[in-house]
């Protein structure tokens, strides 16, 4: 049995920020399914949005966010996060994040400290701080090094949390977090971890779809665990599809950053015709949901495999300096972005909904917090504005840590060990991979960019059948990472479909052919798991 003051599940920007804010005073565990560096944060190319230009204002940033959010953002949450944006940038600079400084584009694109500001779709001004086109990697590398060297932080790499342990689960009078059961993937043993505070920083659920820009770890673990523990989940129908994922048989999940369009890239059909002005007056600078639907429409209308994002009209040296990662990767695949368009398709990218939290990142369960893509703070509404997500990770990670530090020390009780007495080794593990493939294909076919009630009902029926098979496996066989991830994915898939069926309109990222109009007033979709009776039935 392991004992800590705080356990953080996940090792992206939100998790590392929280850990580093806590570790000077508390004993912290960071639990991650693979290595610390395997997180969606590392894949982020664009940057972090913050008002740094004296000509810009927080109110303008707020308005851009509210417009992108389609009427579903919670104004107080937006205000809180964006007001703390500049302070969060200062903290990252103090940690050593090497944000890009003034380049050949000139001082008009920089802020007073000399950091270069770029612009992305949906933003009315240049306010994106970045590290070339690999911001996430730079931030992740910087904070990871600090976490690895901190004496109060213990890393549990290649460990996967099975479920949270709460007072309710153990029928204790005292509700709240007591700990978690964790699978050590190397020894295949299940550890019991006791701690009074747990922070879910597990990222999103992109792997529930067949095509995604997310890493393989994005299986909705935090959302599923929180749901099973009794937390409210909100707005799961709003899955952001990144409009420009590189289309190539050897380019797995490689996205082409929003900043390429922000810096002048245009979307074209294979014959060179530009099409975005016909779909929206903002053309390529429209929010992601608009651009993704436009690409989806053109591909389906014309039977295309992809469209092309062309920025070859810009100076070659500018492209090599501003987008070195994209330039290098595309060149490896035989695509020279200085001379030709980049083949792109939409792909599942960001989970705008999640575990309901307040401004301190608290969930419905005492001692349980959620930060980053796992959480629903009210910032993103029906559509996330580009580069607000990394910002949310830092602001809410700091808020969670600050709140935990104000709480009195809670004694943890002894917890029962994981019971494996009635399980056996699976004899047909291939069934897990088959179910995994069927679930993701079902979501892609029926719960994609454009939806109908009939498609959603078909998806719901298939998900219910799959859930029965998966739960039978979970009940009778020893757990493995593949089985645990599949169990989480089927829970998340069900939440997405249930949320989508309940929304009888089209808004933001949720577009229904049955209800193409938008209702006069916007309401979030909030799901609450029925409480079990004393007999154990729902």
Image (spheres, rainbow, N blue to C red):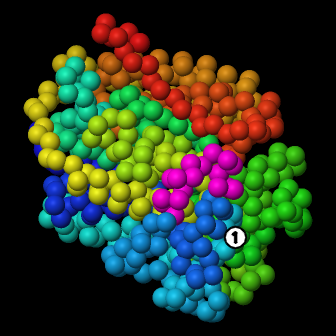
- In the rendered image, residue 467, in percent from the top left (x then y), is placed at 48, 22
> Residue at coordinates 14% horizontally, 30% vertically from top-left?
415
> How many badges with numbers are in the image?
1
- In the rendered image, residue 332, in percent from the top left (x then y), is placed at 59, 72
Lateral position of residue 342 relative to residue 404, left or right: right
> Residue at coordinates 38% horizontally, 28% vertically from top-left?
230
Crowding at mark 1 (Cα within 10 Å: few <14, some 14-19, many 20+) = some
- In the rendered image, residue 441, in percent from the top left (x then y), is placed at 62, 35
Task: Assess whether residue 69 is covered by the magenta stretch.
Answer: yes
Q: Which residue is mark 1?
A: 124
> What is the magenta segment's predominant secondary structure?
helix
The one of 392 and 479 positioned closer to us in this rendering: 392
Task: State which region is magenta.
Answer: 66-82
The image quarter containing residue 176 is top left
Position of the N terminus, as image quadrant, is top left
Lateral position of residue 439 relative to residue 42, left or right: right
Task: Using the image, determine if residue 366 lies above or below residue 311.
Answer: above
The image quarter containing residue 51 is bottom right
Task: Using the image, determine if residue 230 lies above or below residue 66.
Answer: above
């Amino acid at each position: 049995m392991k004992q800590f003051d705080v356990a953080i599940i996940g090792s992206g920007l939100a998790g590392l920020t929280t850990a580093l804010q806590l570790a000077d005073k508390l004993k912290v565990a960071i639990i991650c399914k693979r290595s610390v560096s395997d997180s969606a944060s590392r894949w982020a190319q664009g940057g972090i949005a913050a008002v740094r230009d004296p000509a810009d204002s927080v109110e303008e940033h707020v308005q851009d966010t509210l417009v992108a959010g389609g009427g579903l953002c919670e104004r107080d949450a937006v205000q809180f996060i964006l007001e703390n944006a500049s302070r969060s940038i200062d903290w990252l600079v103090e940690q050593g994040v090497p944000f890009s400084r003034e380049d050949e584009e000139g001082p008009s694109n920089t802020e007073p400290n000399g950091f270069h500001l770029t612009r992305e779709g949906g933003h009315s001004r240049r306010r994106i701080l970045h590290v070339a086109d690999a911001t996430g990697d730079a931030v992740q590398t910087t904070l990871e090094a600090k976490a690895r060297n901190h004496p109060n932080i213990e890393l549990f790499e290649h460990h996967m949390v099975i479920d949270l342990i709460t007072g309710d689960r153990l029928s204790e009078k005292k509700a709240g977090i007591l700990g978690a059961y964790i699978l050590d993937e190397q020894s295949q043993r299940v550890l019991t971890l006791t701690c009074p505070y747990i922070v879910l920083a597990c990222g999103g659920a992109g792997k529930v779809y067949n095509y995604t820009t997310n890493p393989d770890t994005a299986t909705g673990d935090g959302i599923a665990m929180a749901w099973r523990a009794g937390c409210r989940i909100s707005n799961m129908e709003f899955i952001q599809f990144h409009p420009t994922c590189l289309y190539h048989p050897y380019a797995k999940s490689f996205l082409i950053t929003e900043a390429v369009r922000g810096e002048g890239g245009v979307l074209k059909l294979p014959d060179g015709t530009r099409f975005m002005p016909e779909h929206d007056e903002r053309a390529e600078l429209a929010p992601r949901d608009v651009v993704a639907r436009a690409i989806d429409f053109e591909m389906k209308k014309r039977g295309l495999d992809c469209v092309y994002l062309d920025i070859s009209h810009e100076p070659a040296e500018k492209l090599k300096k501003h987008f070195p990662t994209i330039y290098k990767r595309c060149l490896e695949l035989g695509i020279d972005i200085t001379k030709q368009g980049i083949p792109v398709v939409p792909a599942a990218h960001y989970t705008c909904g999640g575990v309901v939290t307040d401004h301190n990142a608290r969930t419905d369960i005492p001692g349980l917090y959620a930060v980053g893509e796992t959480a629903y703070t009210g910032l993103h509404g029906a559509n996330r504005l580009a580069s607000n997500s990394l910002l949310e990770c830092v602001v809410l990670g700091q808020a969670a840590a600050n709140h935990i530090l104000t709480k009195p020390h809670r004694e943890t009780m002894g917890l029962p060990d994981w019971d494996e007495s009635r399980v056996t080794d699976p004899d047909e593990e291939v069934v897990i991979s088959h179910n995994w493939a069927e679930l993701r294909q079902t979501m892609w076919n029926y719960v994609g960019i454009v939806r109908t009630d009939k498609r959603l009902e078909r998806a719901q029926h298939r998900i219910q059948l799959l859930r029965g098979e998966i739960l039978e496996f979970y009940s009778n066989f020893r757990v493995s990472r593949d089985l645990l991830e599949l169990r989480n994915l089927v829970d998340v898939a069900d939440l997405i479909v249930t949320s989508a069926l309940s929304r009888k309109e089209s808004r933001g990222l949720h577009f229904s052919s049955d209800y193409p109009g938008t209702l006069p007033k916007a309401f979030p979709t909030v799901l609450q798991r029925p409480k079990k009776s004393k007999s154990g039935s729902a």
